[in-house]
Image (cartoon, grey):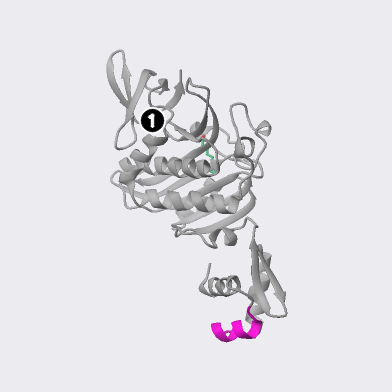
Amino acid sequence: MNETRRSILKALAEGPVSGPELADRLDISRAAIWKQIDGLRDDGFEIESGSDGYELVDVTAYTGSTVEYGLEAPFSVEYHESIGSTNARARELATEGASNMAVLADEQTGGRGRLERAWSAPSGGVWVSVVTRPEITPAQAPLYTLAASVAMARSIREAGVDARIKWPNDVVIPVGEDGDYQKLAGILTEMEGETDRVEWIIVGMGINANIDAESLPEGATTIRDEAGDVDRRLFVQRVLEEFDAYRNDLEAVVPAWRELALTLGQRVRIERAAGDIVGEAVDVTSSGALVIETEEGEKTVSAGDCEHL
Ligand code: BTN
């Protein structure tokens, strides 16, 4: 959002202000002010014009500009009503050199999940892919994914849902006491780099927000079904702010992850190309790998599909 827009919104939020006064304050023409007000209205800001002037009365729309407005994290936001996959769009932007950008969509028609799976992403969810160019090594990259799972789980918890994390990065709600769960959110991370340097990372976060669970595949649940709808604008702002805080404090990620983990203490099976590992999940390492107590002793796995047994 450019400076002029930001200043106009600030003035309109503080109370009624006339067009001429705004033009004076910002040192631009009255015609330019009208144009800006029209543009803001088109972008979903509710601006009333009364005898005292213009006033910002509400911000309920879910658009790139409304999500940027009041966002306390340095991301610019590109919004699509409908798109194939926000990760695919984020990849285009990353290869063009973008950084600190969030691609947001109301609906994805070709949402992508981990392990080449499809990801169902109807209208009403929160589908967002963040492009960053961090100064980290590829070995630290999994911490970015864990940071995103912590960010999503904490934001979902604020919405009144008992969200927990299933290793490595699914956000789930526990069902019963046996480690069973239903999935609320997932992450698809993509990365480009060399052996000792990351060029860019895309963290694609998918949260089943204001959707009926019955329209999703079996085993999935939604914030709507668990606690009622969220204001997606405020909700995605929280997710982006939490993600920003944790990516800037990578040492805090694993302790926060541990606090929310559903997997620790569970008997698990990790499916890997190199062979399955079965045992009790006892800890995560400082880089987010899972430590499993097996019959042959302790084993550490950094990737794989995890099943709670
Ligand atoms: C998974 O659990 O398999 C990961 C799902 C990731 C889905 C998100 S939705 C936003 C972003 N765009 C995509 O196409 N995928 C990710």
Q: Which residue is mark 1?
A: 303
Farthest top residue in view: 295
Could you say whether the residue bearing mark 1 is in a helix, strand or loop? loop
Q: Is residue 55 above or below residue 95?
A: below
Residue 275 percent location from the top left of the image: 38, 19
Q: Please check the rendered image and state whether residue 23 is part of the magenta-colored stretch, yes or no.
A: yes
Q: Is residue 135 above or below residue 27?
A: above
Q: Amino acid at mark 1?
A: Ala
Q: Badge 1: few (under 14), some or many (20 or more) residues near its Cα, within 10 Å? A: some
Residue 303 percent location from the top left of the image: 38, 30
Residue 175 percent location from the top left of the image: 54, 25
Q: Is residue 192 above or below residue 97?
A: above
The one of 242 and 269 positioned closer to us in this rendering: 242
The one of 231 and 107 positioned closer to us in this rendering: 231
Residue placed at 58% from the left, 46% from the top?
A: 126
Q: Main secondary structure of the magenta part?
A: helix
Q: Quadrant of residue 279?
A: top left
Residue placed at 38% from the left, 48% from the top?
A: 246
Q: For this view, does 176 lie left or right of residue 20? A: left
Q: Please check the rendered image and state whether residue 25 is part of the magenta-colored stretch, yes or no.
A: yes
State which region is magenta: 17-30
Asked if one can make out residue 85 in the rendered structure from this viewpoint, the answer is no
Q: Quadrant of residue 120?
A: top right
Residue placed at 58% from the left, 84% from the top?
A: 28
Residue 226 percent location from the top left of the image: 60, 35
